[in-house]
Amino acid sequence: MKSLDRLIRALRRLPGVGPRQAERFAAYFLRASQGETEEFIHALVTVKQDVKLCPVCFAYSEGGLCPICSDPDRDHGLICVVEDPQDIEALEKTEAYKGLYHVLHGAISPLEGRSAEQVKVRELLARVHNSEDPVREVIIATDPDSEGETTALYLADLLRGLVGQVTRIGYGVPLGGDIDYMDELTLGYSLKGRTKL
Amino acid sequence: MKSLDRLIRALRRLPGVGPRQAERFAAYFLRASQGETEEFIHALVTVKQDVKLCPVCFAYSEGGLCPICSDPDRDHGLICVVEDPQDIEALEKTEAYKGLYHVLHGAISPLEGRSAEQVKVRELLARVHNSEDPVREVIIATDPDSEGETTALYLADLLRGLVGQVTRIGYGVPLGGDIDYMDELTLGYSLKGRTKL
């Protein structure tokens, strides 16, 4: 059926969704009541209308500065660089960070053809350059995978000299992890980064 | 942000989607172009308008009998009972079956409060009863889990006497499976169901 195939194709564009899951999602929508479907479409349309990006940090915002950038109690001399807007929520939950953020919207990936121009790198440099408060530190919190690492090294090169210091989030064994399931690279970093008890 | 939360809540209703995946899906829609979003909504609305259930077997159909039920070359004396419409596609791919199907739209589940009245059991009985071609065999291909088993036993009781014979799909080790990772129940069945070489 053409219309069903088209919906399945559209659902497959969702991140990480394979053919079977897309079929299952389509089956959900086929079973869903007219009211549920309308509610879903309404939520989608509203989000596309209402949710914009903060012009400073590129986090989600309902127009104008986001709540973090406009909060005078946050430390405006500290910027944490992340790949995706969702990363902010994860970091905020730690309650260990009181600075600002900068969302790149991706990582530099030569393999996927994503260059520095396609993520918000230029915007970060302009921001650091034009900041009213001098930026004491930029913490690079891109993902600890090859793309995130590439991006971190690239940014560090660009930012050195422009800001007080550039740091990278610490590597090590995650809490609740199992030492004997850990890869040797992580374990190596956890040894190098050991702290005194 | 309220509108973002509402979309995430709507996405969490998709089968098997947890909070993190729903956030990632919402982020996809936020990044998507207006054109992509409209295409998605269009596909969804069209599916809800166009895709109906076949009045005989309850598979998806674009109105009227589905292609399988209306195919005179299929064996109309053979009915394979499945839980979900997607199961048909999987079975068709085997090219080992030339009969008709009957979609229950779920399995009987006392735990989830799903009784025989909430799946298409009555419709199956009526269909078998009123069939022009006498039904020689009903193959029960519900999932090999506790709900699927319950449903299979329940249907077998109801159908015995009404049809030539009631059968259940074979249990055993799946191809490409690993014997030492297999549970003992499956292995037991694979021994009982062994075939001569």
Image (spheres, coloured by chain):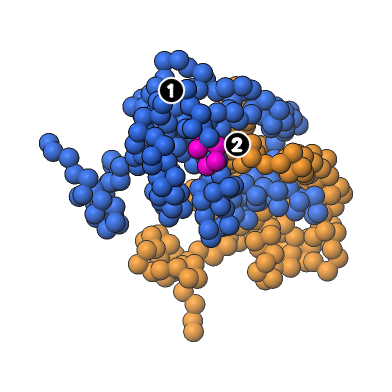
Chain colours: A orange, B blue
Quadrant of the image occupied by residue A17: top right
Indicate yes or no whether the magenta region holds residue B53.
no
Q: Is residue A73 above or below residue B183?
A: below
Amino acid, disc 2: Ala
Q: Report the magenta residues as a range.
A: B121-125
Task: Give me the chain letter of mark 1.
Answer: B
Q: Which is closer to the viewer, label 2 or label 1?
A: 1
Q: Can residue B57 be seen in the rendering of this structure?
A: yes
Q: CA distance from mark 2 to mark 1?
A: 33 Å
Residue at horizontal 40 percent and vertical 68 percent from the top: A178
Q: Is residue B50 above or below residue A100?
A: above
Amino acid, disc 1: Asp
Q: Which residue in the protein does label 2 denote?
A: A26
Indicate yes or no whether the magenta region holds residue B122.
yes
Classify residue A80 as left or right of residue A49.
Answer: left
Q: Which residue in the protein does label 1 denote?
A: B133
Question: Element type at marker 1?
Answer: loop
- Where does the image place residue A127, in percent across and percent down from the top left? 77, 50
Quadrant for the C terminus of chain B, please.
Answer: top left
Assess disc 1: are there few (<14), some (14-19) or many (≥20) residues with their C-alpha within 10 Å of its C-alpha. Answer: few
Q: Label for residue A177?
A: none
Classify residue B34 as left or right of residue B63.
Answer: right
Task: Give me the chain letter of mark 2.
Answer: A
Observer-nearest of A44 and A63: A44
